[in-house]
Amino acid sequence: MRVPRSVLAVGGVVAAAALIGFMKPATVHALTAALVQVANTATNPVVSSEVSRTAAQTVALCIGQDVTGARTPFEEVLPGGGFGGSAYVVPDGESLMITEIDIQPQAGGKFRLLPVTTGLGGGSLEQFFEVPGDGLTHQFLFPNGLAWPSGQNIPYSVDTGIGEVCMRGYLTRS
């Protein structure tokens, strides 16, 4: 008597499912982990940061004007509100990846991140933004991030028509 191959294939799958059903959950987990592997290569990087640490690495910085009308340096916005009180400097051994810049104009004008040597391939980073005086907040997004080097503050120039400028990003090891 010949048994068709399709019947043998279905029978094999049923037998394998029954065998897995009798295994301990830890054994099933190990078997599944062996079948699913993630390759972390330069062309296909895998984010492997602990979730609780990611939030701790988030940085928000703002400039504005003090009571005399003078511009303030970029200061860190603290979690409870308020500012850090001094010019923000990227911590040693880390890079600041700027992912967002918000510019709120009063009368329109230009905002410029001044050139700074990045140390990343010998290049320098400089960004220039011009916004109209429409009273709206203008948001610029950088999904891959603008890498700001460790040990650097964030120099800028700004026209008098620009009100507040805020940046958000995260720290990563250099």
Image (cartoon, helix red, strand yellow):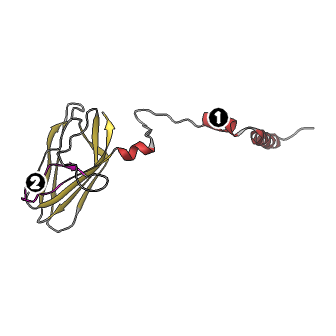
State the mark number for residue 71: 2
Residue type, numbered disc 2: Arg
Front residue of 111/15: it is 111
Residue 66 horizontal side relative to residue 23, left or right: left
- Badge 1: residue crowd in 10 Å (few <14, some 14–19, many ≥20): few
Q: Earlier in the sequence, mark 2 or mark 1?
A: 1
Q: Residue at x 20, y 31 (%)?
A: 122
- Quadrant into which the C terminus falls: top left
Q: How many numbered marks have been drawn onto this rendered protein structure?
A: 2
Q: Residue at x 19, y 38 (%)?
A: 152
Prevailing secondary structure class for the magenta stretch in the rendered image: loop
- Location of residue 106 with respect to 112 vertically, above or below: below
Residue 45 horizontal side relative to residue 121, left or right: right
Residue type, numbered disc 1: Ala
Q: Which residue is mark 1?
A: 30
> What x and y, as percent, mark residue 2?
89, 38
Residue 15 lies in the magenta stretch? no
Q: The residue tagged with tag 2: helix, strand or loop? A: loop
Residue 66 lies in the magenta stretch? yes
Magenta stretch bounds: 62-76
> What x and y, as percent, mark residue 16?
76, 39
Q: Residue at x 61, y 33 (%)?
A: 34
Q: Residue at x 93, y 38 (%)?
A: 1
- State which quadrant residue 155 falls in: top left
- State which quadrant residue 130 falls in: bottom left
> What x and y, as percent, mark residue 104?
19, 62
Residue 171 horizontal side relative to residue 104, left or right: right
